[in-house]
Amino acid sequence: MRLRSVSIIFRKELIEILRDRRTLIAMVVVPILLYPVLMLGSIHAAQFQSGKMQREEIRIAVPDDATAQRLSAEIEADNAAVPTGSPEAAECIRRYDMLVTPDPRDALRKGAVQVAIVPGPGPKTWDRWEIDPPFVLCYDSAEIRSEMARTRLERVLERRRVAVREERLARLPEEQRELFAPRAIPVENVASPEKVGGSLLGNVLPLILALMTITAAVYPAIDLTAGERERGTLETLMVAPVPVIDLIVGKFLVVAAVSLIAAALNLASIGLTLRFGDVQEMLAQGMQARIPVAVLPLILLAMIPFAILFSAILIAVASFARSFKEAQNYVMPVIMAALIPGTAGALPGVELQGVMTVIPVANMVLLTRELLLGHFANWPAMAVALGSTCFYAVVAVVVAARLFGQEAVLFADAGSWKTLFRRRFFIPSSRPSPTHVLLYVAVLFPVWFHIQGQLGPHIGLSSVLIVVFFGVLPLALARYLKLGWRSTFSLRGAAAIQWIGAVAIGLSSWVIASEVLVLQSRVIPLPEGLAEADAEMTRILAGWPLPTLLLALAVVPGICEELTFRGFVLSGLQSRLRPATAIVITALFFGAFHFLFLRFGVTVALGILLGYVCQRSGSIGPAMLIHIMHNSWLFVLSRWDRLAAALGAADLDGTTHLPRRLIAVSAVLIILGLVAISRPPRDAVPGSPADR
Amino acid sequence: MILAENLVKTFPRPDGGWTAAVDGLSFEVRPGEIYGLLGPNGAGKTTTLRILSGLMRPTSGRAILAGYDVVARPQDAKRAIGFLTASTGLYQRLTPRELLTYFAQLHGLDGEPVQRRVRELIEWLGMESFADLRCGALSTGQRQRASIARALVADPPVLVLDEPTLGLDVMTNRIILDFVRRQREAGKTILLSTHYLDEAETLCDRIGLLYRGRLIAEGDLSALRRLAGRERLTDIFLKLVGEQGGGEDRLIPPQPEETHAASLG
């Protein structure tokens, strides 16, 4: 990828797309004009409607004239008591009409009135309320007007009830007052006005913003890919001496820019509407609320990875289409698919934690809500959400580059798109491509994250799932894609000296890893509860015989994880990237898949070591051996007390240093092991440009 | 120069078999020469030109452009080629001047040379009156002139022209053919496919007759006349194709595990 050609393409596409009326409407006009109009309009309409209902006459059915008189008196008293202009005043019943009928319930059922008063369980006269009130307030919950009338009449009667109660309390001698039920429980809202506003906005804004950002990206994404094909300019572009990835990255940046501009304009428009329209109070409906306008720029920052992800996905989907119409057909399901996790994220009670941090769209909706609520302490989860979104975006861009300008898309006569998916059209190749690898990781990552969270201490089930997802799946995928197993999984023999080197490293790597964790705990304090969780785990594992533990937690993960990471992933990345880059990226995936924040650094380092061993030896065997031995040590030491004591490693709690001599010997062993493995490779080594 | 060696391109058929659109095609085009690829519809002309310009991968065989293998060194080969088809579209919302600048930059030109080259082409092709209008507002002839300028903007040594005069009026036709001749004088290697036999007769130095993916005859006009015993190219064409006619379709039977097209990988 060359920066120069990307920027040439970016500039040209931006000019072209900005000259298009449709983009400008979707990007600029909609947010700037439509938004405030819609928002203010709908709120005013709602307000007008509820105001009208409040001004409306309430019709009340009563059984007799006496009740009618008493009720009128209560209503008038309430009207007199509530000062006009207070928030409560809107609830007062200014206009009402009494219907005296022997059967008020029937009048209510027939819809002649909105509420009815019927004789209640208490005394028949309104002068004496005793314990039960002398009436029952009837309403029809299926009628919105009846519901509203009930609320307002209930408030008037409740005022009377409290007055009766206080009057009686005052008459009682002090010692008898406790016979009365306690007063209502006092409730106080401590949320700051900003937080109330944030929560009001947090329910609606993230999803709206997400939708607006996606919508703005749809048209340019289609125009720059399928549109190019439809207008016949794609052929000439593909003949230009520019790699497809440059074209796609340039186009993708334009789409991302357009959708970000749209997101910014949306946010600005919302901010201004909230700031200067009298929307705040209407939204808050009497609550003390202030919209935290200062957070809006932060939300824009959070929208960047989201816009990037969707621009990339839309470009990938539209790259696949031969015409505008076809692209629109493909894009609709994508937007619908985005809406499902987006709506899930917008549900009340769903929080940014666990698997939600890595579910695309949902995590960004939740992240926006956290920002609006000011939950900045949750930054690790926010970081995971941002990071995973960026990763998915990279995958989508790479896939888009793979699809864009493909023969099957470019020319109708080159066979249909089936050539891209039907196995019989696949060209056998020795190793997977980076696209395969990235797609595989992007799909497996959230799935495994979820499984990991559900699994708990079922070591049997866990090893079965590891075999399925990390062993069988990559092997089956390699078979489906017609890849060479030997080169994909480095299934070759290694020299004896390299096996010896692997044993040396396998014997000592745990010492260094444990020591690094101890040093790390000095800088990053261990979170509370970790020791208890560890102890709990140890207690569970103690119930299993050592060979079972070693099989389930060392041998199975050692073999399967190597097949996936040093096999499928590493060989796929090496087909395009330099070996060192491929090894580091593989190790980062390896670390991410372990979902242990504190061990991430150590796991990545181990991944780099294993990648190096596999790359140098040309065989996955030594890496598997090291991985198995590395995993085994913890269990071996916990069972063989005398060995642990002899090594000075009886106390592996993550905070106690190991003996210096042990560390020194281990370091020397690792270096010797690496030297042994680094012997000049034989002729066939993965990473040599054997194939494209 | 252009060198095609035993090019084969097969496409999947709906019934699971494969059709060979180009079937073992070999030819050579030298600098300073216009080579005409002639053939009826479906003979494989367009597929051949697409392979040469790197838009399609040959199933087998080799194509060399200006010394670069189009499969192994695609970017180098593309840098050497100016490609033009009748169906070429232009960016509707750019002006011809912007369009030319864009493609010049994509070919690696930069700064003042780009502007000079663009001015030069606008002058040569008489595009002054519409160089700053949006392409969407141009007439067919104006568009085709802009397309030609686009193909030539990086001054490539090889020109591949797929029916460049299809659907054009006499005037524009003349401008374009004159331009092609001038490119030959400048020493360019020019490969041209056309339906218009009179055009091929007056323009091409050598002609290859393509039928069902194979070259059935090749040579300059006099050689073809001798071969067919006819005077006019149209008659030569009909005679030679007629001799081939009635032959069975060379279709390859279904081969489930056989793999030809690209995969998602």
Image: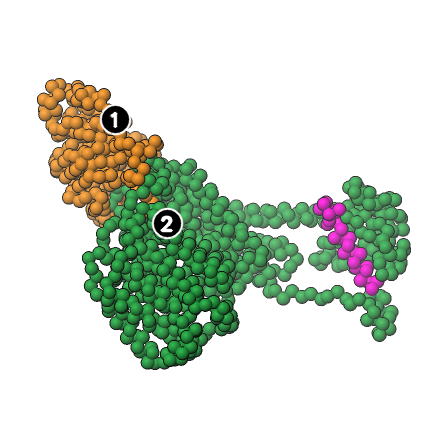
* Helix, strand or loop for disc 2: helix
Position of A40 compared to A561: left or right? right
Position of A487 compared to A378: left or right? left
- Within-10-Å neighbours for mark 2: few <14, some 14–19, many 20+: few
Instruction: Give the main secondary structure, helix, strand or loop, of the magenta stretch.
Output: helix
* Helix, strand or loop for disc 1: loop
Decide if residue B9 is in sight here.
Answer: yes
Label number found at residue A583: none
Instruction: Check the image and report above or below for A275 versus B203.
Output: below
The amino acid beneath tag 1 is Asp
Q: Which chain is green?
A: A
Position of B175 compared to A421: left or right? left
Label number found at residue B249: 1
> Which chain is mark 2 on?
A
Counting from the top left corner in percent of width and height, residue B41 is at 26, 26
Counting from the top left corner in percent of width and height, residue A525 is at 45, 74
Q: Quadrant of residue A87?
A: bottom right
The residue under the point 43% across, 64% down is A548
> Which chain is mark 1 on?
B
Kindly report the distance in space between the C-alpha atoms of the residues bearing marks 2 and 1: 39 Å
The amino acid beneath tag 2 is Ala
Label number found at residue A476: 2
- Within-10-Å neighbours for mark 1: few <14, some 14–19, many 20+: few
The residue under the point 59% across, 53% down is A279
Give the colour chain B carries in the figure.
orange
Q: Is residue A212 magenta?
A: no
Q: Which residues are magenta?
A: A140-165
